[in-house]
Amino acid sequence: MTAAAGEKKVLLTGATGYIGGRLLHMFEERGMMVRCLARRPEFLRHRAGPKTEVIGGDVLEADSLESALQGIDTAYYLIHSMGSAGGFEENDRRGAENFAEAAADAGIKRIVYLGGLGEPGALSHHLASRQEVGEILRCSGVPTIEFRASIIIGSGSLSFEMIRALTERLPLMTTPRWVLQKAQPIGIEDVLDYLIQACEIELKESRIFEIGGPERATYADIIREYASLRGLRRWIIPVPVLTPRLSGLWLGLVTPLYARIGRKLVDSLRNETVVRNPDALEVFPIRPKNLRVSLERALHNEDHRFALTRWSDAFSSKGEEIKAGAMKFGNRLIDSRSYDVNVKPHAAFEPIMCIGGDRGWYAADWLWRIRGFLDLLAGGVGIRRGRRDSRDLIPGDTVDFWRVEACDPPRLLRLAAEMKVPGRAWLQFEVEPVPHGSRIRQTALFDPVGLAGLLYWYSLYPVHQLVFRGMLRGIVKEAQKQRLKE
């Protein structure tokens, strides 16, 4: 890795993790010279930019760290072993000791570390280990900035996904007493701003900075705020008899967390995690957003990230047969299927541009009419709006009870549902060139609101399979007719 004279070089550990992955992209957007240390570099190389260096290494193997730290100005230590099956404390301790010694030997100018808030002497095993790691790094002789944070609010974060799953799935929650423990949540964007600026501020000695949003809140408060944003009503009844083990098993049943992670997370939640030293607000020009805004940003960023992601990337198609499957993206439920046709993309896209209205939906039109009639009874728009033009679509057009959200012929058509549903729904069509023609991808997506949304999706699953499969077959049939006209 080469850099212009005077340009800082950064080593990033944990780049495959939640914080590290986002931080890597921010470094790359700023044009910074970055080297990533990864145990499985082959998993990271395809995510990193062309100018980012990825090398293999493991903090538990001291010999692998020497070359990784050569020529580095600032090293980010974003590693912890919460998900390991064994005793994570020993792994955290040994990894930090190896890294601290190697950093000192390499002449690193600064270490940046993200740990956890909590008062020493009354910490869970998890938080005590996080703070022990910070102490080991500070004792290395290398000036170290240790950030301590409470709940991090961001799409995809462990805490946010747990809050989302609990709120969406359970109208009435009998919860462990830790939901009443005070915390000081902070948005992921603010955490990343702190981490970025940590390599820029003047620092002559190690410092601990406690970071958090402007308000203190319990998990119950966060659940209620999330429910308010989603238009849900939720009732919370704390039950004091649930132990961390039982709470972990409970979380494993109703959230995406598996029991081992759930137990460790719950163990840390029984501590009050609030900011007691406000020095971060004096040293850094960052004013963290409040809880509601952080939650809104998490949901918005998820929508943005989803819009930039190909919904059907997880699926592939070979040969002329339908490949279909179901998956989840955050809280969203997805049905995606594709088919290869021996026609050029513009011909494959032609029937997609004509969908709905008088042309119909290429399969089970009688079911679409019934759905439209039921929508009218529920106060919706039904399918009586039809289309503006039988062959042309632009963003904002209506297509029965859908509205065109994006249209980029012959590549993309995305429709947003305007019928009455307990959530939000989209229907997307993509066409891409393949060696012998085109691949048509059809994706239906549903963002359920609460238990009613989940019941709606799964109760109609057999009907959806009939409709979605038939619709793609109909589009393919029409596309193949275009070949005869070429």
Image (cartoon, rainbow, N blue to C red):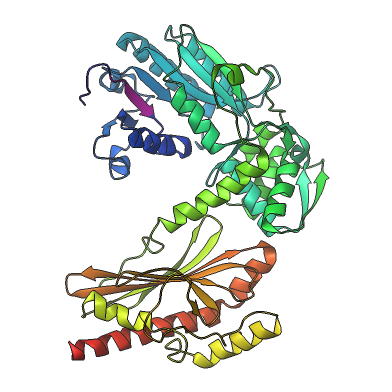
Magenta portion: prevailing SS class: strand
The percent position of residue 355, horizontal first and vertical second, equals: 42, 83
Residue 257 visible? The answer is no
Task: Point out residue 57 in the picture as x, y percentages from the top left corner.
Answer: 31, 28
Describe residue 369's horizontal placement relative to residue 354 as left or right: right
The quarter of the picture where the C terminus appears is bottom left
The reply to whether residue 201 is visible in this rendering is yes
Residue drawn at the location 63% of the way across and 29% of the way down: 212
Q: Quadrant of the N terminus?
A: top left
Q: Is residue 126 above or below residue 199?
A: below
Q: In the picture shown, does residue 172 fall above or below 147? A: below
Position of 341 with respect to 103 (left or right) is left
What residue lies at 44% left-to-right and 9% top-to-bottom?
140
Q: Quadrant of the rendered structure where residue 56 is?
A: top left
Q: Residue drawn 73% across and 36% down? A: 217
273 horizontally vs 152: left or right: right
Residue 332, image quadrant: bottom right
| Residue 412 percent across, percent down from the top left | 35, 69
Residue pictured at 42% horizontal, 34% vertical: 23
Residue 116, placed above or below residue 48 = above
Residue 360: x %, y % from top left: 45, 89
Is residue 188 highlighted in magenta?
no
Q: Is residue 363 above or below residue 143?
A: below
Q: Is residue 197 left or right of residue 339?
A: right
Q: Count the marks.
A: 0
Q: Which residues are magenta?
A: 7-12
Residue at the limit of the structure toward the front, as seen here: 388
